[in-house]
Structure formats: C-alpha cells, structure tokens
Image: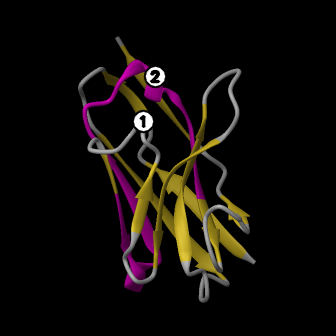
Amino acid sequence: QVRLVESGGGLVQAGGSLRLSCVASGSAFGMNAMGWYRQAPGKQRELVAGIISGGSTNYANSVKDRFTISRDTAKNTVYLQMNNLKPEDTAVYYCVASPVTVARVASWGQGTQVTVSS
C-alpha cells in the first residue's frame, strides 16, 4: 500500500505563490503516475495536474501557465508550484498516485488546505 503525505498548504493573498510537496512511501515502486486533485467547498473533486515517469505532464485549463508539476523520482516526491494564485484556487489539494494514469487513482493523500484571499 502506498502512503502519500502532503505539505505546503496555507493562506496566501491573491497573486501570491505556494509550493505543495507530496512524499510517497510504502509500495511506491510501480506508481507510474502521480498528480494533484483539488476540491473546493460545494464542488466536485477535480484533476489539477498529473505527471508520469517519463516526464509528460497534463494540466486543467484553469491552472495552465500558472501551476507547474514536477517529480523527483529518487525521493519519491511530487511537487506542485502554484503561482499567481486566485481566490478560486481555494480548495483542499490531494496528492494521488496510480500505476497507469491519474485519471484512475489508486491512492490518495489526506489533503492540504490552500486558501487564497482576495
């Protein structure tokens, strides 16, 4: 079983930046895809960004050109650099892992709160 632990959330003003980190442990070997989902109050959980072992990435349209996902395979860690944050980015952000694709999540982290004030 894979354990995912997120960190880096917090409160920031609009236009500011945060970097989320997620460390995978346990049976992390074979988790080809890692990424981030988010869930805002009263809304469905949505995919924010994903990355696979080869380095290919994908992003939600709402965060393209503002967020960057990266991965340090040696450290079993995935990052989400969030720039030019907007109040609508306020949500709980969840780290995810999957053997194949983040569209089919196998493991979830506990989540970290990101709050962007206007």
Q: What element carries label 2?
A: helix
Image point (47%, 78%), residue name = 76
In the picture, residue 116 is in which quadrant? Answer: top left
Image point (68%, 75%), residue name = 2
Establish if 62 lies above or below 105: above
How many residues crowd around disc 2 within 10 Å: few (fewer than 14), some, or many (20 or more)? few
Establish if 9 lies above or below 15: below
- In terms of sequence position, does the residue under pointer 1 or pointer 2 come before the other? 1
Mark 2 lies on residue: 88
Q: Give the range drawn in magenta.
A: 69-95
On residue 53, the disc is none
Q: Which of 55 and 78 is in front in this view?
A: 55
Is there CB contact under 8 Å for labels 1 and 2? yes
Going by the numbered disc 2, the residue's amino acid type is: Glu
Between the C-alphas of marks 1 and 2, the distance is 10 Å
Front of the two marks 1 and 2 = 1
- Identify the image quadrant of the C terminus: top left
Mark 1 lies on residue: 62
Q: In the image, is 53 to the left or to the right of 97?
A: left
